[in-house]
Image: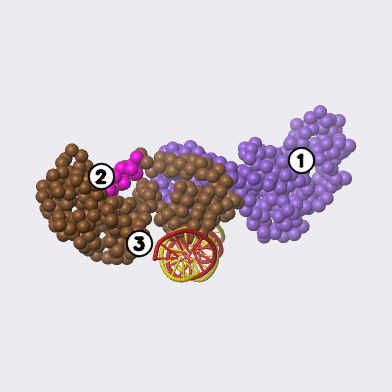
Chain colours: A brown, B purple, C yellow, D red
Amino acid sequence: MEVDIHGIRAFVIAAEELHFGRAGERLFVSQQALSKRIRRLEEALGTPMFERTTRTVELTAAGSRFLPLAVEALSAFDRAVAAIRVSDDPLRVDVYDERFTPLRILRAASDRDPRLRVELSMRQGLSVAIPALRRQEIDVAFGRVHDLPWPWPPELVRRLVHVEPLHAFIPEDHMLAGKSELRPADLCEWGISLPDPAGAAEWRGYLRRLADRLGVPLRFTAPAIGQRHLVEQFLREKRAVGLGEMSIDAAGSGLRRIPIVDPTPLHPWSVVWHRQNTRPMLQTLIRDLPAAVLPPPSDRRYWVPDVDYLPALS
Amino acid sequence: MEVDIHGIRAFVIAAEELHFGRAGERLFVSQQALSKRIRRLEEALGTPMFERTTRTVELTAAGSRFLPLAVEALSAFDRAVAAIRVSDDPLRVDVYDERFTPLRILRAASDRDPRLRVELSMRQGLSVAIPALRRQEIDVAFGRVHDLPWPWPPELVRRLVHVEPLHAFIPEDHMLAGKSELRPADLCEWGISLPDPAGAAEWRGYLRRLADRLGVPLRFTAPAIGQRHLVEQFLREKRAVGLGEMSIDAAGSGLRRIPIVDPTPLHPWSVVWHRQNTRPMLQTLIRDLPAAVLPPPSDRRYWVPDVDYLPALS
DNA sequence: CTGGATCCACAACCAATGGTTGTCAATCCG
DNA sequence: CGGATTGACAACCATTGGTTGTGGATCCAG
């Protein structure tokens, strides 16, 4: 019964999250495994670190005393390891496209850990990136993990890391441009127009389900490459509304970005990697990425495709 | 395949010893287990830490770079753990008697680790201390592990930590006092006189074997309590020579301390503890104690009882 | 009040881990 | 040359640390 660094890492993450399930997700183990780890640490140290109820987790006084020391020990440990592993090749990361969340996620991770070195690709679709992942030609990809053209490959692992609301993008001279928010009823007459997802079956599937849910006609235009191209296509629209993430830079372009509400469509972003890829830098990255949760299906303010609530298999 | 603190500790100790067998002893595992641990660490880090031949172990360049970082990580880890474990009760240590090595060993350990807190007892014999060890009334004892009144108890663990030469102690007006060293032939006419070992069967056994080896008569006087008492008894001797460790303070007492050579008698000191005693402070102490080795039996300069070369069982 | 959702922990299970013993190959030295 | 030394391979197996299934306590909306 000895204290080990895994126990300390589990403690630090659980202390951040104050929720064993989410801490377990961040470490890619079940809540029960996380609970056992913390229990083992507590027994090795001889004193409880957390007080738990069935619903809440709080640090004990000893836990609060231990936390800064534990963080320092973890930091020294990771520093020592990283100093030797520093010669790792860059992580090969597919970030989908610059219009979407993955690039922001990666930038945030890089800000948090300057040792992270990456080599980017933008395949514009998880369905397109997965064959490369399976062949271990890339280390990481991001995307929506349902509505793929095939069953989920068993050698791949994924974790939900972000849930992103979609906004409407409308030319300033459009009839809807004066609204501060849009509802499905506002969109019925005008429809939705987007660049064709090409090989990104999961994005096409998402949009189809969204159009069904909103009862709005959906039309695909020519595929767009990059943000500027997308903005140009949205500006060319006379009727249909464009959709995209908040991070699309519309300022000064003649486009208005308007939130969609009741429901706000949410796009789930998961990180995906190969089960056998044991590169330390990869492990560090995925451990660092935050856990995300989908809103309860009962929450009418948001919409997520039903299929996205299904667990492992699709 | 992940780096862990056990691997780092193994690395640091192996880097100190540059000998896998001795490093393994310090960690209470076999040489093979130590070798595996280092190998696992090297695989996790992706580069060798040591270059080995069948006879030598040397740090690689990466190993040398890693060592200070590893020491720092270990130190931060141990600090974090010790800060929480600081409320441990003192270790209950039997140090035999103040005339002998164990007290010095313990003082050195305490100098190296100021967090070590101990409660001393002096039972003047391992044979006397072992029942208390078996009942876990004390945490640690020191002594010679052979010639006990019973077979070695399987619930106890021991490790050789020191090999101490014995010296002759002679009144300044004794015929032998002018000699700079003594040989067995010098002692035959005078004999050896010591306080009766009372319950310390292992010390009695050692002395009997020594007297046989040297061909010298052995006589026991009344038991002595402490150093001053022992010095007084040695001074009262008209003929026989006293024996003891170098640390016996004879300065200004009228006693001369003279080395015995060809052979120098060596007394082996082992640390002994209970297998089921998992107190972290105990683990820290025994991990900190140095490994010792007996000289090869072929080395005629020294004498150790033959039985002391036997492994686990006696 | 009831039923469903949430969240930590217990229990059973089992693959993986990390140790042991036995043995071997390379090397050194008397 | 033979014996001693020392790290590593191989076989074995007890222990470890994860998983899944389940349960109890609690919360909250209907």
Question: Which residue is at a point 10% across and 50% down the rendered structure image?
Answer: A238
In percent of width and height, residue B267 lies at 71, 45
Question: Which residue is at a point 27% across and 46% down the rendered structure image?
Answer: A103
Q: Is residue A172 visible?
A: yes
Q: Quadrant of the N terminus of chain A?
A: bottom right
Are labels 3 and 1 assigned to the same chain? no
In percent of width and height, residue B258 lies at 76, 34
Chain letter belonging to callout 1: B
To which residue does mark 2 refer?
A247
Residue range corresponding to the magenta coloring: A95-111
Of residues A227 and A113, the one nearer the viewer is: A227
To which residue does mark 3 refer?
A298
Question: Which residue is at a point 77% across and 57% down the rendered structure image?
Answer: B149
Against A159, residue B262 (above or below) is: above
**Please, what is the dominant secondary structure of the magenta stretch?**
helix
Q: Residues within 10 Å of mark 3 (few under 14, many from 20)?
A: few
Chain letter belonging to callout 3: A
Which one is closest to the eye, mark 3 or mark 2?
3
Q: Quadrant of residue B247?
A: top right
Q: Quadrant of the C terminus of chain A?
A: bottom left
Q: Amino acid at mark 3?
A: Ser
Are labels 3 and 2 assigned to the same chain? yes
- Circle 1: element type: loop
Disc nearer the start of the sequence (3/2): 2
To which residue does mark 1 refer?
B98
Q: Is residue B38 visible?
A: no
Q: Amino acid at mark 2?
A: Ser
Of residues B280 and A165, the one nearer the viewer is: A165
Against B169, residue A12 (above or below) is: below
Of residues B87 and B227, the one nearer the viewer is: B87
